[in-house]
Image (tube, rainbow, N blue to C red):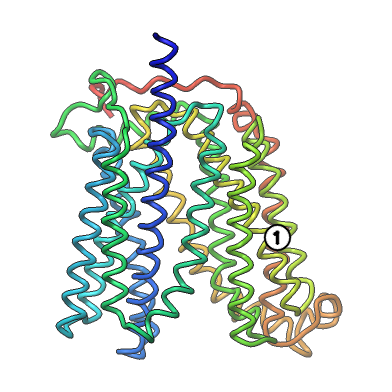
Amino acid sequence: MERTASASVRVSSSRSFWLLWSGQCASLIGSGLTTFSVGVHIFQATRSITRFALVALAGALPGVLASPLLGVLVDRHNRRSTMMLADALGGAATAVLFVGAATGRLTPSFAYTCTAILSVCASLQWAAYGAAVTQLIPQDRLSRANGAVQAGEAIAQIVAPVLAGALLPLAGLRVILLVDLVSYMLAIATAAAAWVPDLPLASRSRGASDVRREVASALRYLRVRPGLLSLMALLAANNFVLGVLQPLLTPLVLGFASPRALGTTLTLSALGMLAGGIAVAAWGGSRRPIDGILLFTAIGGVGIFAGALRPAVAWIAMGGFVLMFSAAIVVASSQTVWQRQVSPAMQGRVFALRRAIALLSWPLGALFAGPVAEFLFEPWLQPGGALAGSLGRVISVGPGRGVAALYLLLGCVLVLIAVVGSLSRPLRRLDGEAPAEPPDLTSGA
């Protein structure tokens, strides 16, 4: 009888995971449609690059800043219910956007406010989703589950821009917002049909009025886990490099090719992420996830380096595919480590804190990218430039080749990050450590 009950719970857990996965995939695609289309609408209405960029900023920064507080909410309540709340609030914000579009009142400030709310909802949903996976999936299958999560995100990245680009000129913004509303409904429906166990009462965070202390408990939890701090630093460095790379891909390709070639490169890069997620889901990942993180960080660096060697779409697309394939495995392996090492009662707060730190390093990289590429590397790789007679003989000179030189440097940096990580004893010991117990939440910060 006990064996039958255990098998029943396992089946229910697996079914619940796939229900949540399918609903979140639908929601990610819908959100991608809205993000793309609202940005295009604001740009077409204002012809302002700054206002277009502010839509993207409003869609990212509020969620990052609110993450520590949202993590407290995740640890206080059932993770499935929290995901449903996040999707319901996201759907409500999308409905407000629809009303604004239907009445002709979708001004930039209106769009900033709604996308900021969507950003907070997405962060809440992400923290609850990651913590729910730990409760549903056995530790020996976490890597496969996280590979599936990465594959779902890649599917959304591939499908959403293509679908939005096709629908927007044919059906308009209002239809796209309706599609997004349907995706939120699907996410809520699948979450309602899923099962995620409640945390034991003794494990739940206490002190409804003392949010500050609960946020500080996540910092204390990490302070005594030097391996996790090392992993967070490695991933923040990775995100900084990727934050530099992403905005420079456009000038790299358009320096010698057409916008169509840029679209091809972006699509192949996203396919690399999809292939990486599928690979982890099928393979199960490395038995020692830290080794997988370090190895594929280095492989990603080699991909960047190789892709920048020639001004050819095939080379750059190949490099993008290798980078995103590797990044998917790094993210899935990292998530597995965090899920294994962090006590379930603390995962909402700790996951939200690490997300905030990781995502803040991305825009810092983007801010660094433009001035360094435009005022240093590009002049150096023009005919007669400082590096034209040396490095220019290898990678050629002209528009975009300074960006290529910066790509070469960043590829080497990723390999160096992997080498430094391999020398970190706290990081290498993570695979063999048992999860730490949560700190006493009643103690002082």
Residue 177 location, x and y as percent? 28, 71
Tell me which corner region of the image, top left, top right, bottom left or bottom right, holds residue 346. top left
Q: Please, is residue 436 above or below residue 297 in the view? A: above
The crowd level at tag 1 (other Cα within 10 Å; few <14, some 14-19, many 20+) is many
Q: Please, is residue 299 above or below residue 245 in the view? A: above
Of residue 371 and residue 144, the one placed in the foreground of this image is: 144
Q: Which residue is mark 1?
A: 411
Q: Which residue appears at 52% of the width and 66% of the height?
A: 158
Residue 263 location, x and y as percent? 58, 78
Q: Please, is residue 70 above or below residue 405 in the view? A: above
Residue 408 location, x and y as percent? 73, 66
Q: Which residue appears at 52% of the width and 33% of the height?
A: 142
Tell me which corner region of the image, top left, top right, bottom left or bottom right, holds residue 73. top left
Residue 211 location, x and y as percent? 20, 37
Q: Which residue appears at 54% of the width and 58% of the height?
A: 240
Q: Secondary structure at mark 1?
A: helix
Q: Quadrant of the N terminus?
A: top left
Of residue 134 and residue 66, the one placed in the foreground of this image is: 134
- Left-right relation of 78 to 252: left
- Left-right relation of 163 to 184: right
Amino acid at circle 1:
Gly
